[in-house]
Amino acid sequence: MGKLEERSRKRGKRKHLQDVILNTIAVAGVLSIGLLAPNVIGAMSKLGLIPNKRQKEYVSSSASKMVKKGLLRYNGKFYELTTLGQKRLRRWSLNHFKFTKPKKWDKKWRVIIFDIPDKKRKIRDLIRSLLKSAGFYLLQESVWVYPYDCEDIIALLKTDFGVGKDLLYLIVEELENDKHLREEFNLI
């Protein structure tokens, strides 16, 4: 394994560690150092996120870095999520989000259209990535299609990324030449 691959692997593990810490704090409300040691650290090492020897040190270091980034707040006894941390956690959750498909399709297409300015390029790319990972189909540049209701998630995207006026959610009863879309989503 080359040095670049090794660095990338370590960065990925740190990202997972931060994700686990944020999720733990979100579930518990707060995370004390005492709670961290037996439960969370053991689970993290079983997942292969941190090596056994210096577990507590890795978690403390990662949590401290997250405080510096403004994701967590530490009051001397426990860590808690900041507003920015909650926002980051929602983004990570959205990145792995999969819609539950209803038993029967209502024969309506959900079309997402966005025109996000170049100054928000990172956000535009992130939204594109989220739509793709959630199973949306790219119909044209910045036009995505999905056959099931997803209005709540799109509203959350609009709010979290501040692109409310730049992103449109349409419910379309008829879409010209949609046979390939029905095949794509196994609706035939």
Image (spheres, rainbow, N blue to C red):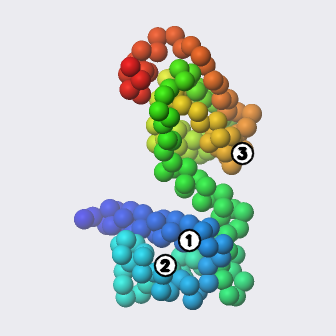
- Mark 2, Cα crowd under 10 Å, few <14 / some 14-19 / many 20+, is some
User: In this picture, is 17 found above or below 84?
Assistant: below
Name the amino acid, label 3: Thr
Q: Are marks 2 and 1 in contact (CB under 8 Å)?
A: yes
Question: Closer to the N terminus: mark 1 or mark 3?
Answer: 1
Q: Which residue is mark 1?
A: 24
Q: Which residue is mark 3?
A: 159
User: In this picture, is 66 found above or below 169?
Assistant: below
User: In this picture, is 157 found above or below 146?
Assistant: below
Name the amino acid, label 2: Val
Q: Quadrant of residue 149?
A: top right
Q: Are marks 3 and 2 in contact (CB under 8 Å)?
A: no
Q: Position of residue 79 (x, y in %)?
A: 65, 78
Q: Secondary structure at mark 2?
A: helix
Question: Closer to the N terminus: mark 3 or mark 2?
Answer: 2
Q: CA distance from mark 3 to mark 2?
A: 31 Å
**Is 163 on the left or on the right of 43, as rendered?**
right
**Closer to us: 9 or 22:** 22
Q: Position of residue 187 (x, y in %)?
A: 41, 23
Q: Which residue is mark 2?
A: 40
